[in-house]
């Protein structure tokens, strides 16, 4: 029988194993954000990451207003200018 700290950790429920998705066609069409979240709780797309389309991130709603407040800007978020390097 285990004693000490490790014995207390056995009270957690066992974690479910992930189902590894092997093709993009195995990803269903979702009808809601909750459906997406529930599916990804049990599935992993790590094996097909290179096959998935990359999309630009968009910030909207409450998160956008918090971001704008943090930056101290209003309206559209501004890009920070990058200094150009001269080839010398």
Image (cartoon, helix red, strand yellow):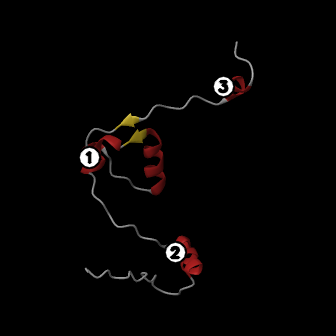
Q: Residues within 10 Å of mark 2 (few under 14, many from 20)?
A: some
Mark 3, mark 1: which one is toward the viewer? 3
The residue wearing badge 1 is: 24
Q: Which label is found at residue 80?
A: none
Question: Residue 7, position in %: x, y?
Answer: 70, 22
Give the residue pinned by disc 2: 64
Gap between marks 2 and 1 measured at Cα: 31 Å
Q: Quadrant where the N terminus lies?
A: top right
- Left or right? Give the position of 2 relative to 28: right
Q: Quadrant of the C terminus?
A: bottom left
Seen at 68% across and 25% down, the residue is 6
Q: Is residue 74 above or below residue 39?
A: below
Q: Residue furthest front?
A: 88
- State yes or no: discs 3 and 1 in contact (Cβ < 8 Å): no
Q: Position of residue 8 (x, y in %)?
A: 72, 27
| Secondary structure of residue under mark 2 | helix
Q: CA distance from mark 2 to mark 3?
A: 41 Å
Total marks placed: 3
Q: Secondary structure at mark 3?
A: helix
Q: Is residue 22 above or below residue 75?
A: above
Residue matched to label 3: 10
Counting residues from the N terminus, which is met first, the one under dot 2 or under dot 3? 3
């Amino acid at each position: 029988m285990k004693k000490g700290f490790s014995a207390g950790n056995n009270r957690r429920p066992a974690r479910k194993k992930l189902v590894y998705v092997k093709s993009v066609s195995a990803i269903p069409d979702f009808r809601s954000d909750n459906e997406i979240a529930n599916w990804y709780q049990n599935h992993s797309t790590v094996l097909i990451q290179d096959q998935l389309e990359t999309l630009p991130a968009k910030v909207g709603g409450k998160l956008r207003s918090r971001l704008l407040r943090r930056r101290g800007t209003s309206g559209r978020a501004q890009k920070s200018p990058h200094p150009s390097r001269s080839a010398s």
